Amino acid sequence: MKRVKQQGTEKRSSILPTGLFSAGDFGSSYSPASAMLTPPQIGVRVGDSMGDVVNAVKGVGFYVDQIGFGAPSTGLTSGMDLKPLGVNYFIKTGAQCSNGAEMWNYMEGIPNGDALGSKMKTVMTDMGLPELKGLGPGMIEDAKHALDPAPLMNSLFGSGYPECKQVTLEVGDAYKRIKDPDTGDYWISDPETAKNTGNGFFQTRWVQNTNEKGQPVNLTREQWINTEKTYNEDGTPKTAVSAFVGHMTRPSSMIVIGVLCLIAYGTLRRR
């Protein structure tokens, strides 16, 4: 069942989806606990040989680095398949862009290493250590984003009629995957639209436009309505035929056509 969107303060039915939920409706199904490599996957096995002991010690170092850095930090873990946990994906906002496309929001679930600020990132680099992209710093980043009042203030004081821009951004986890290797469940919505470039998957979506200060760009209701809807809801451009039909069904176009018809009819009657 097709959901009905609500723009601004218009009185419409609920904007919540009434059909089956997807990864783009309420977030991704990605679980860091499930995505973390298990001891056997990193070479740790039960045994009494010296090699088994060394691998066990390296396994401890692996999980310490997984929590703190999200990358090898010493010679002990060097060469191990260790990357930050998390997933980047697009989530639906429930709003519609002025051009007719559905608006999305890009969620950066992979830590970017700024949990303790840009100065600490520089210090870590100067010390020859990787950036803080482990589970611990990632939780701090999530808390910072959750406490950021900007999105809430925009939703409260914004017009509800966004102007959008098209972006192409990487989706999936740091291992360049977009689905759970064990269950096969996708972590992103519309996986068929994700393009594999050979260096990760990328999706193209419409997100809210921002000005030079990074502030979201909103329109008035009149501006939003008068903007030509040249894109379908799924973000694909309308064909020339459908765009023409859409233009002809606008109230202003109908009035103009009606006036022209009356003039033409009057001209023919005089003849």
Image (cartoon, grey):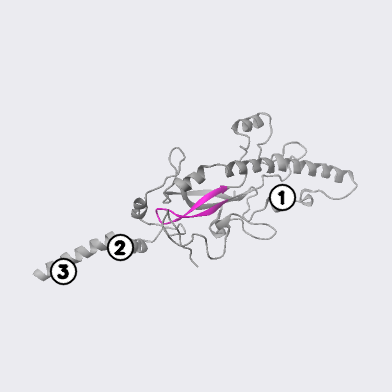
Name which quarter of the figure residue 226 lies in. Answer: bottom left
> How much space separates mark 1 and mark 2, taking CA atoms?
55 Å
Q: Does the rendering let one see residue 157?
A: yes
Q: Amino acid at mark 3?
A: Tyr
> How much space separates mark 1 and mark 3, taking CA atoms?
75 Å
Using the image, determine if residue 238 lies above or below residue 42.
below
- Numbered circle sitting on residue 177: none
Q: Which residues are magenta?
A: 89-107
Q: Which residue shows up at 77% across the image and 48% down it? A: 42
Circle 2: element type:
helix
Question: Is 265 left or right of 47, judged from the image as shown?
Answer: left
Q: Earlier in the sequence, mark 1 or mark 3?
A: 1
- Numbered circle sitting on residue 265: 3
Q: Which residue shows up at 66% across the image and 32% down it? A: 124
Q: Earlier in the sequence, mark 3 or mark 2?
A: 2
Q: Amino acid at mark 1?
A: Met
Question: Which is nearer the eye, 179 or 49?
Answer: 179
Q: Is residue 98 magenta?
A: yes
Circle 3: element type:
helix
- Numbered circle sitting on residue 36: 1
Question: Which is nearer the eye, 93 or 89?
Answer: 93
Residue designated by label 2: 248
Using the image, determine if residue 2 lies above or below residue 132.
below
Q: Which residue shows up at 66% across the image and 40% down it? A: 137
- Badge 2 crowding class, 10 Å Cα cut-off, few under 14, some 14 to 19, many 20 or more, is some
Name which quarter of the figure residue 187 lies in. Answer: bottom right
Outermost residue toward the right?
48
> How much space separates mark 3 and mark 2, taking CA atoms?
20 Å
Whether the residues at callouts 1 and 3 have beta carbons within 8 Å, the answer is: no
Circle 1: element type:
loop
Classified by dominant secondary structure, the portion drawn in magenta counts as strand
